[in-house]
Image: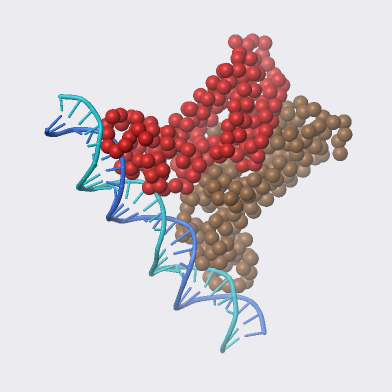
Chain colours: A brown, B red, C cyan, D blue
DNA sequence: CAAAGGTCGAACCGATCGGTACGAACTCGG
DNA sequence: CCGAGTTCGTACCGATCGGTTCGACCTTTG
């Protein structure tokens, strides 16, 4: 509660706090599942403040999706990096991190994919596409460092496993989805044709 | 236009025609992206008729999702079956069929997943779960006939590839998503430990 | 202390929402 | 030909939608 009533202590602070607070609400209720009035009430902010900072409900949605995409991608990248230098270990750690996410009781699938599924508007879909770009870059890097002859194709296949595991965990059964995907990913990594040159 | 004005020629016909006509509209616009009035207008039916047959907008949505799930699953199963008796050929044919779907300009991802992402209501999520069940059964059958030692795990991994390919095709790049997924699927099938016994 | 500006809370706007009601038009089985 | 059943078109309902406005309150700046 950094903003009791009125203040100009730091407008940027208010904006950041709003995005922080609104993330779980929009994630749980869905973009169209909550109105602006209730949304503002739940994050303890007036409508005027919302429209001052974000211009519209969609503006807030887009800002929070962008922030969330960067955060979750960084989280996965760090989980992979913390596993050491072996690309196989990095890949395994990445899927372990995913399983950890699936085990969270509030897990409801990928927020960006959920958003893109309901909002057919362009900005949201563009954010989702960039989100998949980030994932793809991360996975392609692992594939390249593992010496895959065609890291782009392997990276894309790994991306499908990541997204597929997330879908299955969200809509079917979260138990062991990450483990099964990890096993499949390592199999693909092992079976991929490789070049002699690794960087 | 099987129903010009008033008639009792066949109430069931009206119901079936409605579900047929409403499918592409809801798929393209999204469940909450179109109101009941416009929805009825676009399928050439009055609101009274809609509520007579389905009780509510959600009722119509659920009926059409269920029908679509069965139809698309059957379509994939038939594509696989038409490829012959070799499980590898069946799996390849299934992903070829998926690529064919992705190439359709109106392709917007899996309707059931899209619906579940926006409607947090239980009935829709249950339909989506059943939809994944159908896919899983199809893929597990292929895995079993291929002699996989653990067809349930392999089937689940293949399910992740199917769903992941669909997500990537819908939200990132539809080109070659099915081909890349097919290649990965065949790799998993080849690499899977197998029992000596095949039925 | 005064001006400037961020915030709140509530009132308010037109539009649209899902759903209901009803009379008229129509097709059927008897 | 007559009543039962279906459908259409439209008007209508209360609720909610996203968004705007405004006066009061508060904090910072000078």
**Number of numbered discs overlaid on the protein picture:** 0
At 63% from the left edge and 11% from the top edge, which residue is drawn? B198
Q: Can residue A28 be seen in this view?
A: no
Q: Residue A60 placed where, x, y %?
A: 57, 58
At 51% from the left edge and 48% from the top edge, which residue is drawn? A30
Q: In this view, does B43 lie above or below A23?
A: above
Whether residue B104 sits left or right of residue B36 in the image: it is right
Q: Residue B25 versus residue B130: which sits nearer the camera?
A: B25
Q: Can residue B84 be seen in this view?
A: yes
Q: Residue A161 versus residue C16: which sits nearer the camera?
A: C16
Where is the C terminus of chain B found, in terms of image quarters?
top right
Q: Residue A2 placed where, x, y %?
A: 59, 65
Q: Residue B86 versus residue B113: which sits nearer the camera?
A: B86
Q: In this view, does D27 lie above or below A17?
A: below
Where is the N terminus of chain B found, in terms of image quarters?
top left
Q: Residue A123 placed where, x, y %?
A: 60, 52
At 81% from the left edge and 37% from the top edge, which residue is drawn? A145
At 38% from the left edge and 38% from the top edge, which residue is drawn? B59
Q: Is residue B123 above or below residue A190?
A: below
Whether residue A136 sits left or right of residue A2 in the image: it is right
Q: Quadrant for residue D23, please give it.
A: bottom left
Q: Quadrant for residue A153, please give it.
A: top right
Q: Residue A108 placed where, x, y %?
A: 55, 42
Whether residue B121 sits left or right of residue B171 in the image: it is left
Whether residue A77 sits left or right of residue A110 in the image: it is right
């Amino acid at each position: 509660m950094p903003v009791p009533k009125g203040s100009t202590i730091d407008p940027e602070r208010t904006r950041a706090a709003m995005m922080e607070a609104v993330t779980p609400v929009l994630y749980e209720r869905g973009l169209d599942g909550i109105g602006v009035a209730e949304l503002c009430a739940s994050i303890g902010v007036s409508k005027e403040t919302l429209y001052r900072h974000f211009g519209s409900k969609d503006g807030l949605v887009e800002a929070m999706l962008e922030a969330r995409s960067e955060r979750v991608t960084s989280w996965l990248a760090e989980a992979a990096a913390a596993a050491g230098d072996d690309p196989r270990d990095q890949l395994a750690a990445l899927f372990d991190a995913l399983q950890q996410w699936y085990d969270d009781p509030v897990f409801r699938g990928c927020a960006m994919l959920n958003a893109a599924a309901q909002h057919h508007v362009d900005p949201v879909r563009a954010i989702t596409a960039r989100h998949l770009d980030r994932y793809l870059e991360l996975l392609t890097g692992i594939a390249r460092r593992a010496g895959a002859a065609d890291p782009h194709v392997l990276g894309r296949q790994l991306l499908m496993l990541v997204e597929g595991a997330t879908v299955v965990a969200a809509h079917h059964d979260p138990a062991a989805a990450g483990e099964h995907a990890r096993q499949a990913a390592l199999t693909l990594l092992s079976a991929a044709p490789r070049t002699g040159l690794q960087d």
